[in-house]
């Protein structure tokens, strides 16, 4: 039923699981002749004389053996235990192991037998020592006495994490037990050996898969899932290394380093996991991702300076990150978010297991719920990470299989088309070549049209100017030109040929030539009339030219319009926007047509916006036109700024309205602002 390899693999998994169950079951045999009291005495504060066995402590507070004096805890205090030891044990050596978070000095009958970290009367003096699975065993020897005797175990203990609003698993607490020294040493070696095996197994697993996925990303960067998952695995490997490093710390400095590096690796893990979740939805979450990164950076900086105070808050960050991943998974499951790609639900299923196990682990550590099972050597999150690794491998294998299947199908399709429609394919290639040639010619014509526009804007003493043009995909018909006459006198030509393509480009070329020769006329209406008559004689059929000519002299402008949208004028004094309301038919429509004109005087701060009809007729993805009212609103928002800033703002509004879609018609904007 199973292959030889499968049997060995299953046997290996069962062995590792049994190791994990055995770790927390490993306990030393009790010493029936060392009897602990049912209570201890406690006093907050610090005085080294309190280690003296002869000290009277009847006035100290009494607490049950399994209860910590949180109600009177101020950061440092003394604990005294009166232990009954039979005479047969006097002079013999025993072991004592301690599980604690903080700094501790242990005295037996007034003698210092162990020092864990550095006890301090203030947080700055204290050096906390935290080791997974407890510390020790220490050698413990009772002095020779006749008959059963009472010995004093005095503990000087400090832990100022209690001053923090939360402390999670780092809250003030300690436990100790006695046993045969050799048995407890063997038990400690067994724990460290199992921790080493677990760490080697997980590190090897995470590093191997990390290397595979990172290489897959290097060879095919389009699949970013491989990169993000490689980072997840790298962070998992780091977290594994330093999490299990707590079993081997030898001093307070190592404990602090392990705690800090766990914070860094946990932050990297949650950030990369969120990125991996975001990649499967179509919405961009850049701002939200930056917010998570900023919080992670702040927490890690804080932990450098106050490692044991900041570390519990990492759990909240981890919890919020997992809830964000859960939100993404639920949004996809409920149809609120559209999922990109195919097969991503396999990875999201693994991530769901990771989220559930992480939330469970945090609730256990915070004491909100009791563990659902015992005997696990390390947090269940690691098992979830292994599950996520398996899901990612299944997803990758499925992707490769589907890709190969699709390639085979495409190859078969290409072969069929090659055999059945060879001549048709040749004709298609020839047609594509012809289309490419025409496209190149259109692009050259488009570049020629753009080259005909002025290379620089005129420099006026009384006004500043800015201009931009966005051409459609084909050769456009928008056109602007200037004729500088000196003494702050300037003629502005602003036009738009009907349609696109080579014909509209030809009309623009003819109009530019006519403007160069006729722009010296004093009246803009005369300029429009003569250009219109000339275009009519050229016989461009149904090709016309909408155009506006403005003669600028000092703070006075004479306008004449032939079929162009009316310029928008912002009057600084009244802070209102209005149009000049001039109407005339496009150039080349009828010969001898007299165009109306209007003269207006402006003041410093007044702004004029010239635009082609591509702007008000711009469509959004819902096929709605931008319209004059929205343009006035956008224009009014930035009238107090300079011409280029006004142009930049309008371009942003255009992009947002179009939703990234290229314009169907040329859009040209020209802004003139009086100083």
Image: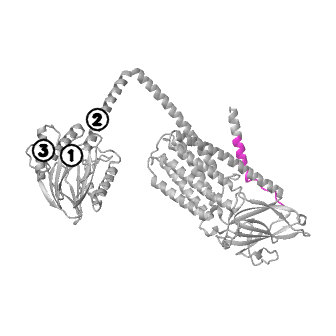
Front of the two marks 2 and 1: 2
- Residue 441: assigned label: 2
- Is 26 one of the magenta-colored residues? yes
Disc 2 element: helix
For label 1, the SS is strand
Few, some or many residues within 10 Å of mark 2 (<14, 14–19, 20+): some
**Residue bearing mark 1:** 496
Indicate the position of residue 354 as horizontal and vertical percent values. 58, 49
User: Is residue 372 something that shows in the picture?
Assistant: no
Left or right of residue 414, residue 499 in this image:
left
Q: Residue at x 32, y 54 (%)?
A: 648
- Mark 2 / mark 3, whichever is N-terminal: 2
Q: Quadrant of the C terminus?
A: bottom left
Q: Quadrant of residue 140?
A: bottom right
- Please state the extent of the stretch shown in magenta in the rendering: 12-32
Q: Position of residue 532 (x, y in %)?
A: 12, 44
């Amino acid at each position: 039923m199973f292959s030889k390899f499968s049997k060995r693999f299953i046997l290996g998994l069962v062995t590792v699981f049994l190791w994990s169950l055995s770790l927390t079951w490993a306990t030393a045999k009790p010493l029936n002749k060392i009897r602990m009291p049912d209570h201890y005495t406690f006093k907050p504060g610090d005085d080294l004389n309190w280690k003296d066995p002869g000290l009277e402590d009847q006035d100290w507070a009494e607490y049950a053996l399994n209860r910590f004096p949180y109600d009177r805890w101020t950061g440092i205090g003394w604990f005294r235990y009166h232990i009954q030891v039979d005479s047969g044990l006097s002079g013999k050596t025993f072991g004592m192991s301690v599980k604690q978070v903080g700094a501790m000095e242990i005295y037996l009958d007034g003698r210092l037998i162990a020092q864990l970290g550095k006890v301090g009367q203030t947080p700055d003096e204290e050096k906390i020592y935290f080791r997974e699975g407890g510390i020790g065993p220490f050698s413990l020897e009772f002095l020779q006495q006749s008959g059963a005797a009472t010995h004093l175990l005095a503990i000087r203990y400090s832990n100022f994490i209690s001053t923090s609003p939360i402390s999670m698993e780092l809250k003030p607490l300690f436990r100790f037990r006695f046993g045969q020294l050799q048995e407890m040493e063997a038990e400690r070696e067994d724990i460290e050996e199992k921790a080493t095996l677990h760490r080697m197994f997980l590190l090897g697993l995470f590093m191997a898969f990390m290397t595979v996925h990172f290489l897959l990303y290097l060879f095919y960067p389009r699949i970013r899932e491989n990169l993000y998952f490689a980072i997840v695995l790298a962070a998992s490997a780091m977290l594994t290394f330093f999490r299990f490093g707590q079993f081997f710390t030898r001093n307070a400095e190592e404990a602090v380093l392990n705690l800090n590096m766990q914070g860094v690796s946990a932050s990297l893990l949650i950030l990369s996991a969120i990125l991996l979740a975001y990649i499967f939805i179509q919405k961009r979450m850049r701002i939200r991702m930056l917010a998570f990164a900023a919080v992670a950076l702040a927490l890690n900086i804080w932990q450098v300076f106050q490692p044991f105070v900041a570390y519990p808050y990492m759990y909240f960050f981890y919890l919020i990150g997992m809830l964000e991943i859960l939100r993404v998974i639920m949004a996809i499951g409920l149809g609120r978010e559209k999922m990109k790609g195919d097969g991503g639900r396999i990875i999201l299923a693994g991530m769901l297991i990771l989220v559930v196990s992480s939330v469970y682990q945090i609730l256990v550590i915070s004491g909100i719920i009791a563990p659902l099972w015992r005997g696990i050597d390390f947090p269940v999150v690691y098992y979830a990470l292994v599950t996520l690794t398996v899901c990612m491998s299944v997803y990758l294998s499925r992707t490769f299989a589907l890709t190969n299947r699709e390639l085979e199908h495409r190859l078969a399709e290409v072969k069929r088309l090659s055999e059945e429609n060879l001549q048709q394919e040749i004709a298609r290639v020839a047609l594509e070549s012809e289309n490419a040639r025409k496209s190149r010619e259109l692009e050259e014509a488009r570049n020629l049209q753009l080259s005909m526009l002025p290379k620089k804007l005129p420099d006026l003493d009384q006004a500043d100017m800015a201009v931009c043009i966005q051409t459609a995909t084909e050769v456009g018909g928008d056109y602007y030109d200037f004729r500088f006459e000196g003494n702050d006198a300037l003629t502005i030509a602003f036009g738009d040929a009907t349609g696109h393509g080579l014909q509209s480009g030809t009309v623009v070329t003819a109009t530019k030539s006519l403007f160069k020769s006729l722009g010296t006329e004093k009246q803009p209406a005369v300029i429009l009339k003569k250009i219109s008559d000339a275009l009519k004689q050229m016989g461009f059929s149904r090709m016309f030219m909408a155009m506006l000519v403005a003669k600028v002299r000092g703070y006075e402008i004479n306008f004449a319009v032939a079929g162009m949208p009316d310029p928008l004028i912002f009057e600084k004094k009244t802070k209102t926007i209005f149009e000049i309301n001039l109407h005339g038919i496009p150039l080349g429509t009828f010969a001898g047509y007299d165009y109306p004109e209007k003269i207006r005087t402006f003041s410093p701060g007044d702004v004029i916006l010239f635009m082609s009809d591509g702007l008000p007729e711009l469509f959004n993805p819902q096929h709605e036109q931008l319209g004059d009212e929205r343009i006035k609103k956008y224009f009014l928002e930035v009238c107090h700024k300079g011409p280029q800033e006004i142009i930049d703002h309008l371009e942003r509004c255009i992009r947002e309205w179009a939703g990234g879609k290229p314009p169907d018609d040329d859009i040209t904007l020209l802004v003139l602002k009086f100083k």
